[in-house]
Image: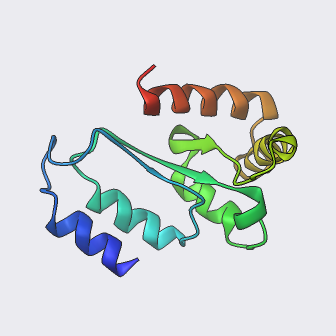
Amino acid sequence: WGPLLDTLNKKFGKKKGDKPPRMYFHAFGGKSAVVKQLNAACRGAQEVFYGFAPCVNFRSSKTADVMRTIGIDSLVLETDRENYKQVKGDLNTNAEFIAEALDLTKNEVIEKTAANARRFYGI
Protein backbone atom coordinates (compact mmCIF):
# COMPACT_ATOMS: atom_id res chain seq x y z
CA TRP A 1 0.00 0.00 0.00
CA GLY A 2 2.99 2.27 0.42
CA PRO A 3 3.41 3.26 -3.25
CA LEU A 4 -0.30 4.04 -3.58
CA LEU A 5 -0.34 6.10 -0.40
CA ASP A 6 2.80 7.95 -1.54
CA THR A 7 1.18 8.74 -4.88
CA LEU A 8 -2.02 9.96 -3.27
CA ASN A 9 -0.11 12.12 -0.83
CA LYS A 10 2.55 13.50 -3.18
CA LYS A 11 1.01 13.73 -6.64
CA PHE A 12 -2.33 15.12 -5.52
CA GLY A 13 -2.88 17.95 -3.08
CA LYS A 14 -4.71 17.59 0.21
CA LYS A 15 -7.50 20.11 -0.20
CA LYS A 16 -10.93 19.69 -1.77
CA GLY A 17 -10.72 19.60 -5.55
CA ASP A 18 -7.12 18.35 -5.67
CA LYS A 19 -8.19 14.76 -6.30
CA PRO A 20 -10.77 13.12 -8.53
CA PRO A 21 -14.27 13.79 -7.15
CA ARG A 22 -14.85 10.13 -6.33
CA MET A 23 -12.39 7.29 -5.81
CA TYR A 24 -13.03 3.55 -5.76
CA PHE A 25 -10.90 0.69 -4.47
CA HIS A 26 -11.87 -2.50 -6.30
CA ALA A 27 -11.55 -5.91 -4.61
CA PHE A 28 -10.06 -4.17 -1.61
CA GLY A 29 -7.69 -6.46 0.27
CA GLY A 30 -6.24 -4.15 2.89
CA LYS A 31 -6.70 -4.14 6.64
CA SER A 32 -8.79 -1.69 8.68
CA ALA A 33 -5.72 0.45 9.35
CA VAL A 34 -5.15 0.79 5.60
CA VAL A 35 -8.75 2.01 5.15
CA LYS A 36 -8.03 4.81 7.59
CA GLN A 37 -4.77 5.67 5.80
CA LEU A 38 -6.45 5.66 2.38
CA ASN A 39 -9.34 7.80 3.59
CA ALA A 40 -6.85 10.30 5.00
CA ALA A 41 -4.79 10.25 1.79
CA CYS A 42 -7.97 10.75 -0.27
CA ARG A 43 -8.94 13.96 1.49
CA GLY A 44 -9.98 16.31 -1.23
CA ALA A 45 -12.10 13.71 -3.00
CA GLN A 46 -15.82 14.09 -2.38
CA GLU A 47 -16.25 10.41 -1.63
CA VAL A 48 -14.27 7.19 -1.40
CA PHE A 49 -15.87 3.82 -2.13
CA TYR A 50 -14.71 0.26 -1.55
CA GLY A 51 -15.77 -3.03 -3.09
CA PHE A 52 -15.09 -6.63 -2.21
CA ALA A 53 -15.24 -9.46 -4.72
CA PRO A 54 -16.40 -12.77 -3.19
CA CYS A 55 -13.99 -14.86 -5.27
CA VAL A 56 -11.08 -12.66 -4.16
CA ASN A 57 -11.83 -11.31 -0.70
CA PHE A 58 -14.13 -13.67 1.13
CA ARG A 59 -11.42 -16.20 1.92
CA SER A 60 -9.91 -13.74 4.40
CA SER A 61 -11.16 -13.73 7.97
CA LYS A 62 -10.48 -9.96 8.18
CA THR A 63 -12.97 -8.98 5.46
CA ALA A 64 -16.01 -8.54 7.73
CA ASP A 65 -14.01 -6.38 10.15
CA VAL A 66 -12.72 -4.23 7.31
CA MET A 67 -16.29 -3.80 6.02
CA ARG A 68 -17.36 -2.64 9.47
CA THR A 69 -14.54 -0.08 9.46
CA ILE A 70 -15.66 1.21 6.05
CA GLY A 71 -19.40 1.24 6.77
CA ILE A 72 -22.35 0.80 4.43
CA ASP A 73 -22.21 4.39 3.14
CA SER A 74 -18.96 3.67 1.29
CA LEU A 75 -19.52 0.12 0.06
CA VAL A 76 -20.58 -1.06 -3.39
CA LEU A 77 -21.40 -4.55 -4.60
CA GLU A 78 -18.99 -6.03 -7.10
CA THR A 79 -17.87 -9.24 -8.66
CA ASP A 80 -14.58 -10.14 -10.26
CA ARG A 81 -16.02 -12.86 -12.47
CA GLU A 82 -15.22 -13.12 -16.14
CA ASN A 83 -18.09 -15.52 -16.77
CA TYR A 84 -21.32 -13.50 -16.85
CA LYS A 85 -23.28 -16.55 -15.65
CA GLN A 86 -21.54 -16.26 -12.26
CA VAL A 87 -22.14 -12.53 -11.74
CA LYS A 88 -25.68 -12.72 -10.32
CA GLY A 89 -24.66 -15.40 -7.81
CA ASP A 90 -21.61 -13.40 -6.75
CA LEU A 91 -23.63 -10.23 -6.23
CA ASN A 92 -26.13 -12.19 -4.14
CA THR A 93 -23.30 -13.71 -2.07
CA ASN A 94 -21.76 -10.28 -1.67
CA ALA A 95 -25.02 -8.72 -0.43
CA GLU A 96 -25.55 -11.55 2.05
CA PHE A 97 -21.99 -11.29 3.35
CA ILE A 98 -22.24 -7.52 3.88
CA ALA A 99 -25.65 -7.90 5.52
CA GLU A 100 -24.25 -10.37 8.03
CA ALA A 101 -21.10 -8.33 8.67
CA LEU A 102 -23.02 -5.08 9.24
CA ASP A 103 -26.15 -6.55 10.86
CA LEU A 104 -28.42 -5.34 8.07
CA THR A 105 -30.99 -7.06 5.90
CA LYS A 106 -29.97 -8.16 2.44
CA ASN A 107 -32.50 -5.71 0.95
CA GLU A 108 -31.02 -2.82 2.97
CA VAL A 109 -27.58 -3.71 1.60
CA ILE A 110 -28.86 -3.90 -1.98
CA GLU A 111 -30.67 -0.56 -1.72
CA LYS A 112 -27.78 1.25 -0.05
CA THR A 113 -25.02 -0.14 -2.25
CA ALA A 114 -27.08 0.62 -5.38
CA ALA A 115 -27.46 4.22 -4.17
CA ASN A 116 -23.70 4.33 -3.49
CA ALA A 117 -22.96 3.07 -7.01
CA ARG A 118 -25.23 5.73 -8.50
CA ARG A 119 -23.39 8.39 -6.48
CA PHE A 120 -20.04 7.02 -7.61
CA TYR A 121 -21.05 7.18 -11.28
CA GLY A 122 -22.86 10.49 -10.83
CA ILE A 123 -26.24 9.17 -11.99
Left of 21 or right of it: where is 105?
Answer: right
Q: Whole-percent x and y of residue 92?
A: 83, 40
* Quadrant of the rendered image containing residue 34: bottom left
Left of 117 or right of it: where is 78?
Answer: right
Split into 4 quadrants, where in the image is the N terminus?
Answer: bottom left
* Quadrant of the rendered image containing residue 76: top right
Query: Which color scheme is applied?
Result: rainbow
Relative to 108, say whether 47 is above or below: below
Which residue, as the protein is rendered here, is positioned at the far bottom? Answer: 2
Task: Report the residue at 60% width, 59% height from top.
Answer: 27
Task: Report the residue at 46% width, 72% height from top.
Answer: 33
Task: Report the residue at 62% width, 28% height from top.
Answer: 114
Relative to 92, say whether 116 is above or below: above
Q: Count the marks.
A: 0
Q: Whole-percent x and y of residue 116?
A: 53, 32
Which residue, as the protein is rendered here, is positioned at the far top? Answer: 123
Task: Report the residue at 71% width, 49% height from top.
Answer: 79
* Quadrant of the rendered image containing residue 45: top left
Q: Whole-percent x and y of residue 50?
A: 52, 51
Left of 57 or right of it: where is 76?
Answer: left
Left of 95 or right of it: where is 120?
Answer: left
Which residue, as the protein is rendered here, is positioned at the far front? Answer: 83
Q: Whole-percent x and y of residue 56?
A: 71, 65
